[in-house]
Image (cartoon, rainbow, N blue to C red):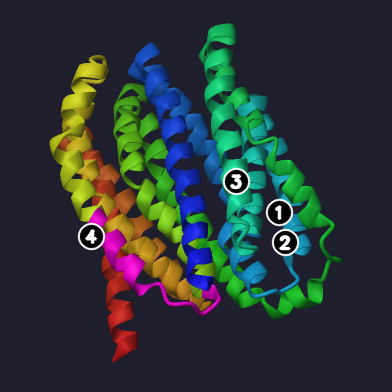
Amino acid sequence: MKRFGRLTGLASVGSADIVGNAIAAVFWFYLASLIDPAKYGEISYFLGIAGVASYIATIGTQNTITVYIAKDVKLQSTLYFISLIVGIISSIVLALIFYRIDVSLLLLAYIVNALALGDLLGRKLFQNYLKYTLIQKSLTLILGVGSYFAFGPNGILYALALSYVSFSIIVYRGLKSSNLDFKLLKSKFGFIFNNYLVYVIGGFTGQIDKLLIAPLFGFAILGNLSLALQVSSVLMILSRVVFRYTLPQDAGGHKTDLIKKLTFLSAIVLAITGVIIAPMIISLAFPKYSEATQVIQIMSLDVIPSTLSMIYWSKFLGMERSRYILISTMIGLVVSVVGIVTLGHLYGIVGLAASLVLSSASQAGYLSCVSYCLKR
């Protein structure tokens, strides 16, 4: 019966992420077919700014919330309160710097999303996770397309921010779930801080391409690379599904070795598929993005090291050994920045794609070495 429950939970998380990401992919691919690479790159740039700011503001990261709720540690309301206060301050700062309210609203939406998903996964409410995820992704498509035709590209970020509104219910309940407990927060500071640094550095690593490429190489290059990243994101759906399922299981001390091995094998198959098939589809569907074809082949290979890193993330977070993940993300960030600056100037957009794959490979390599040493 317990095994059936786990399979049902995995099916719910899997359905949410597969269907939800498919809906989101339809929106982003459809948007790419409507606008030129430069405008697509500009939107990606501001998404990156909102994303990085949300990583800095979210003190109670999604993984921290998931682990502590799974372990029944009463820190949810405290972490929610701090994250929201820092988020509001950050949104005001962004509005003053960029004179864009949409970026500030999207920052707050990202924070609410991270907190709410951490709650649902930590409580193993996988059916609710399915419901809320599909609502958000459906609103992304409906509001995104509607706002584009009503207000043009400038309405996209407002629509995306509004799509997360349903998650505010979960955050409100989380704030009321217990009293603020800063004494308990202090006793758990090491794990929370390490996990926060992992979250911030990992966020920078994931968004650094947008923040650096736009000013160094222009919005058009970023637009082509962003389309390739969308394809890579689709190929990573299965890995993210498994990670969100295994993290609370690992935190609870349950065995997840078999599903992790199957996921890694599936990642290899998906990478090969992306290299062979994806460029043909993109060249036919998006003729404006001619530079993205070869980049997609390179970015498809990123699925393998990224999946391996997620497997180790779940393992080490479940053990509350987040310092290993912290070091790996720092390595990945350094490799990414150096690669973008050097390989980007030497080989153009191909070098930029290669730098992102090398960043993921360096993280996976380090975590693999740590795991091997711990077994000895």
Residue in the image at 23% along x and 47% along y = 270
Residue at (41% x, 34% y) in the render: 22
Q: Tell me the residue that label 2 is attached to.
A: 79
Q: CA distance from mark 1 to mark 3?
A: 9 Å
Q: Which residues are magenta?
A: 251-266
**Tag 2, which secondary structure?**
helix
- Residue at position x 43%, y 53% in the image: 241
237 w.r.t. 263: above or below: above
Three-letter amino acid code of the residue under disc 4: Leu
The residue tagged 1 is 83
- Reading the chain from its start, which is encountered first: label 4 or label 1? 1
Q: Horizontal and vertical percent for residue 40? A: 40, 22
Q: Residues within 10 Å of mark 2 (few under 14, many from 20)?
A: many
Q: Nearer the viewer, mark 4 or mark 1?
A: 4
The label shown at residue 265 is: 4
Measured as percent of width and height from the top left, residue 193 is found at: 60, 69
Q: Label 1: few (<14), some or many (≥20) within 10 Å? A: many
- Whether residue 10 is visible, yes or no, is yes
Residue 1 location in percent, x, y? 53, 71
Residue type at mark 2: give it: Leu
Based on the picture, tell me whether residue 1 belongs to the magenta stretch: no
The residue located at (78%, 61%) in the rendering is 77
Mark 4: give few (<14), some (14-19) or many (20+) Cα within 10 Å. Answer: few
Whether residues under marks 1 and 2 lie with C-beta atoms below 8 angstroms apart, the answer is yes
- The quadrant of the rendering that contains the C terminus is bottom left
